[in-house]
Amino acid sequence: MSTMVLASPSRYVQGAGVLGSLGEHLAKIGTSPLVVADDRVWELVGSTVAESLEAAGLPVVRVGFGTYATAAAVDSLVERITTDGHDVVVGLGGGSVIDAAKAAGHLAGIRWASVPTAASSDAPCSALSVIYTEDGEFEEYRFFPSNPHLVLIDTAVVAHAPARFLVGGIGDALATWVEARAVAAGTGDTMAGGRPTATGTALARLSWELLWENALPALDAVRARVVTPALEKVVEANTLLSGLGFESGGLAAAHAIHNGLTAAPQTHGLTHGEKVNIGTLAQLVLEGAPTEEIEDFIVFTTRVGLPNTLTEVGLTPDSPELAAVAAAATAEGETIHAMPFPVSAEQVVSALKAIEGISRRVRAEAGLPEPVAYVAGH
């Protein structure tokens, strides 16, 4: 029998106002935290974090952050941690700062905590980081022997973040079940280093079910800047369930195609989840999924505000970059090879070309808006 692995953070804390208890939770895992946050995030929540740390008797030390979790950014954090003797590093903000903090904590041999300020990806809970180049191209996955020692997400903070961040998180999380069921049907391993557990696969499916039921009212809540039960469920689906589901249920074509899309400069201004959604639809086409499932997915993701055409990510079916996207998506070691059948670069190009016409037809039939061309930096 093959080995099955389930990975999860040591503690997950979610709710409105929980950022005020960050110090109390951090004090259980360290005495000298280093908070990593960019200037904008610190301006928004820094005072709450500082008060919480001071109340718990912890020093307040914050270091800034750039745009991407690059190897150089990680090494710089390791140097700071080592020089100043920190024993826990806190990634405060989006997926890249959290990935950088995790990678630095691992290299420095200390504990790490994820404190996302938006439910924009499923990165916070996992024992891996995605490392990018300075230009935002996917470079590598880095795997760690343990998950974060703390994940804390304040839904009141999420409610005040731009709605596009939640949309991106929904795109990232919708891929989880589509990929997990493909991995379960095949023979590949998950990111946790073994075959999927029934638990990991079930959590992936629960994430999917919660999103279909709650995504639209949760987005209404964020636009009104209020916390509702629907928003709580979507935050849990995006962050915890999708995090556990992708890591212990498995990644397949959708995220590999996302990684491939980073090779096209036109896509660099898009969120992680917006690019993943293109990968999910392309995976459904690659699988020959039932027509009704594909059409329902297009209608739902259009209503959520996710792209499901090449046009919306700055490409066209004739873009020469599609070959580079497909080559990167099918590179050795990519998660597309966990699909239950072999996938070639040519098949990826064909699926990407196909989604343009499928989505345009379905959207027209459903009376939904035509795709609008995406311009990088827009």
Image (tube, helix red, strand yellow):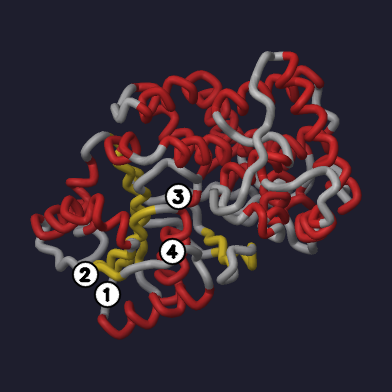
Q: Earlier in the sequence, mark 4 or mark 2?
A: 2
Residue identifier under label 2: 61
Residue identifier under label 3: 125
Q: Nearer the viewer, residue 288 or 295?
A: 295
User: Residue 109, how many percent across, how many down?
Assistant: 40, 74
Residue identifier under label 1: 86
Mark 3 neighbour class, 10 Å CA radius: few under 14, some 14 to 19, many 20 or more:
many
Tag 4 and tag 2, C-beta contact below 8 Å: no
Q: Which residue is located at x 49 percent, y 51 percent?
A: 123
Q: Which residue is located at x 85 percent, y 30 percent?
A: 288
Q: Secondary structure at mark 2?
A: loop
Label 3 or label 2, whichever lies nearer to me, is: 2
Query: Could you tell me how far apart the alpha carbons at marks 1 and 3 are, in whole angstroms?
Result: 21 Å
Q: Earlier in the sequence, mark 2 or mark 1?
A: 2
Residue 239 appears in the figure: no
Q: Secondary structure at mark 1?
A: loop
